[in-house]
Amino acid sequence: MAEVTVVSLETPGSVRQLARYLARDKLALCAALFMLVLITCVLVGSLLMGDLAGKLGLRQRNLAPFSLEHGFIYILGADTLGRAILARLIVGAQNTLGIAAAAVFCSMAAGGTLGLIAGYSERWYGHVIMRLADVIMSFPSLLLALIVLYTLGPSMMNLVIVLAITRMPIFIRTARAEVLELRERMFVSAARSMGAGTSRILFRHIAPLVLPTLVTIAAIDFATVILAESSLSFLGLGIQPPDFTWGAMVANGRGYLASAWWIAFWPGLAILLTTLSLNILASWARTVADPLQRWRLQSLRKAPR
């Protein structure tokens, strides 16, 4: 009798099941491994590198990559002051990803809370919140960040605040759309009839159902914030020396593209690979979360004869 193949539609509830889905998507697996290495560099990179990222070495000035004459730390070459690019990439990852993570978290927390209020309440302040979101979205985010940072001055705190404000409308609109649908559900009516207050209904009953969507949006938006931060740092409006990010490293090497291309190439490549990996993982996560698409990641099973 011919064998019949059956597609499993089981829910991905365990870490082992998610690992199997990830192993079947080779591109997503490579992206996950890259992000794992990057996160490890963020957590322990500063301890391992010590002062190597800022150590000057005029003998190694503009040292070409793939040379082990001065040690493995110079495998990617050195910049105009003889500082090892590999060490600066590892230390710069901490600042770049740290700023992006802080900005995304703040925008998700503030935007999600405002979206909950705007979606559940029909009073005037709900409309004010949405109009403020429209005003922010009417300005190009990079232009708005340039104006604010030029006025307030470049610093890590100002950079996080500006990036968070420019990304807030996405979370406000998403949370509001979710709440508009959830507030008509039976469990909300039951909680209201039992005397539950607005705050309890919002943060105890509705917010836990909205949070997974906001986390997904935050994961997708993380790559966008990294690009925005790198652009601002490239223009000199990011964190100031002696601190640095990947965008600042690209800016330092833009004047040497003809003679020492590696100074700007490696941090640019790091930005490219990070944003690409995040987008690939976000796409993989959407596929896993959608039962209609999950079958693409599941192996075919043989039915019993």
Image (cartoon, helix red, strand yellow):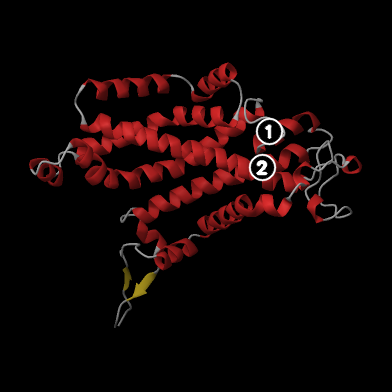
224 on left or right of 247: left
Q: Amino acid at mark 1?
A: Ala
Q: Amino acid at mark 2?
A: Gly
What residue appears at the point 61 percent right and 25 percent down from the top-left corner? Answer: 154
Residue 130: which quarter of the image? top left
The kind of secondary structure element at disc 1 is helix
**Visible in this render: residue 171?**
no
Q: Residues within 10 Å of mark 1 (few under 14, many from 20)?
A: many
Residue 101 x %, y %: 51, 41
Decide which of 292, 87 is in the foreground and name it. Answer: 87
Residue 230 x %, y %: 61, 33
What residue appears at the point 45 percent right and 28 percent down from the top-left corner? Answer: 165
The kind of secondary structure element at disc 2 is helix
Decide which of 278, 293 is in the foreground and name it. Answer: 278
244 on left or right of 144: right
Give the Cα separation between the discs numbered 1 and 2: 9 Å
What residue appears at the point 47 percent right and 64 percent down from the top-left corner? Answer: 24
Q: Which residue is mark 2?
A: 92
Decide which of 69, 240 is in the foreground and name it. Answer: 240
Q: Which residue is mark 1?
A: 248
Residue 301, above or below 146: below
Residue 33: which quarter of the image? bottom right
Residue 103 x %, y %: 49, 36
Name the residue furthest right: 59
Residue 251 x %, y %: 71, 30
Label 2 near label 1: C-beta < 8 Å? yes
Q: Residues within 10 Å of mark 2 (few under 14, many from 20)?
A: many
Which quadrant would the N terminus be assigned to in this image?
bottom left
